[in-house]
Image (cartoon, coloured by chain):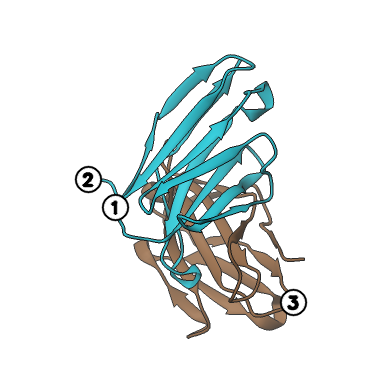
Amino acid sequence: DADVTQTPRNRITKTGKRIMLECSQTKGHDRMYWYRQDPGLGLRLIYYSFDVKDINKGEISDGYSVSRQAQAKFSLSLESAIPNQTALYFCATSDTLAGGQYFGPGTRLLVL
Amino acid sequence: AQSVTQLGSHVSVSEGALVLLRCNYSSSVPPYLFWYVQYPNQGLQLLLKYTSAATLVKGINGFEAEFKKSETSFHLTKPSAHMSDAAEYFCAVTKGRGANNLFFGTGTRLTVIP
């Protein structure tokens, strides 16, 4: 079984809809991250969390919110989706920063 | 501010040729440096990392990278390209060693020509 799983893997939604992307990990890591990937822009950090009570904004948090329900679960919400949020979204985990981050398979989101 | 620059968004090499993917960083403090690979329709996989031990770092699949502080570079190399190396490669850097997260370059897509 994969160490970092994301659901759904693909999602099409309409402008204005609320959508939640979920991430679960079995690596036992405290740190979890949400990124979005756009062609030519690399990965940009949306939010990160170092434990259940610690949530931090990343580079591009506007229009997004997160919830850390447990050490193993970190959800990303788009309260009112807009077309420029169409992207590939990745969840990642890490034990320490020097250890590197472990990525899920991604969720491809299309907002019409 | 820290940043990562990957020179060349697309690189093509012949099978068996040297692979060289360039990464330069800017950081006012000693960083950690990483290379990740992304195969089509997959997440990112850690190739190798520099965390202040040896400056020449060996990773998976025959890749290696050398940290050169004087050049602020961390270029990725492989002596002989294989068809299975075709993928997108990302360089990433931390802002110092107590930093909270990684900053990624924009990626280099490697094509291997038979």
* Chain seen in cyan: A
Compared with B94, B28 (above or below) is below
- Label 3 secondary element: loop
- Label 1 CA crowd tier, 10 Å (few <14, some 14–19, many 20+): some
* Rendering coords of residue B5 (x, y %): 70, 59
Residue position for label 3: B28
Residue type at the position of mark 3: Ser
- Label 3 CA crowd tier, 10 Å (few <14, some 14–19, many 20+): few
Question: What is the count of numbered marks?
Answer: 3
- Label 1 secondary element: loop
Q: Could you tell me which chain the residue with mark 2 belongs to? A: A
* Chain seen in brown: B
Specify the quadrant of the image occupied by residue B47. bottom left
Q: Which is more foreground, mark 1 or mark 3? A: 1
The disc placed on residue A77 is: none
Residue position for label 1: A26
- Label 2 secondary element: loop
User: Gap between marks 2 and 3, in whole Å?
Assistant: 40 Å
* Rendering coords of residue A103 (x, y %): 42, 50
* Rendering coords of residue A79 (x, y %): 60, 27
Q: Are marks 2 and 3 on the same chain?
A: no
Identity of the residue furthest to the right in this view: B1
Compared with A14, A72 (above or below) is below
Residue type at the position of mark 1: Thr
Residue placed most toward the observer, B104 or A79 = A79
Residue placed most toward the observer, B24 or A63 = A63
The disc placed on residue A1 is: 2
